[in-house]
Amino acid sequence: MNAMSFTPPPADKKRLEQGAEFTPRFDEKGLVTTVVTESETGRLLMVAHMNAEALALTLQTGIAHYWSRSRKSLWKKGETSGNMQRVHAIETDCDQDVLHLKVHVEGDGVSCHTGAHSCFYRQVELVDGQPRLVAHEHLSQK
């Protein structure tokens, strides 16, 4: 696979925000936050991070790759579970420091390591005046 590099963001704000050049703004750790939604429904599936290598592999293969901050390694989403994320679109925000992937989840359609369809399977609610997490999706039995 050919190496892909990304041009540093331009200093000219208008060029950054309105130009056609893709210049992702990686943070001091070399990562860009990536929001992932289901292309068919728009449902929020997960939030992850990409380094330049993960982003390049995602662009080249059409399969989502991320950087695992906990494992400190490249991660091809769904490689072991079969629930790969096929990328339908990649968007970036105005200052190019956040990416938005619209994906179709293959396999069982599960995106969370807990077995939930989405990593956002709990809702914060006030119970007796205290914030509590209430599950709104059943988790698989692992």
Image (spheres, grey):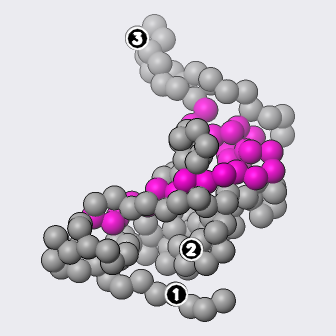
Image marks 2 and 3: residues in contact by CB distance under 8 Å: no
Image marks 1 and 3: residues in contact by CB distance under 8 Å: no
- In the displayed structure, 6 sits above or below 45; it is below
Q: Circle 3 sits on which residue? A: 129
Q: In this rendering, which labeled residue sits more in front, label 1 or label 3?
A: 1
The numbered mark, 1 or 2, whose residue comes first in the sequence reads: 1
- In terms of secondary structure, where does tag 2 sit? helix
Q: CA distance from mark 2 to mark 3?
A: 46 Å
Image marks 1 and 2: residues in contact by CB distance under 8 Å: yes
Q: Which mark is residue 59?
A: 2
Residue 48 appears in view: no
Position of residue 79 measured from the top left corner of the image (x, y, whole percent): 77, 64
Position of residue 138 measured from the top left corner of the image (x, y, whole percent): 73, 27
Q: Which mark is residue 4?
A: 1
Rendered residue at 58%/48% (across/down): 39
Quadrant for the C terminus in the image: top right
Residue 5 appears in view: yes
Q: Which mark is residue 136?
A: none
Q: Disc 3 residue type?
A: Gly
Q: Disc 2 residue type?
A: Leu
Tell me which segment is drawn in magenta. 95-121
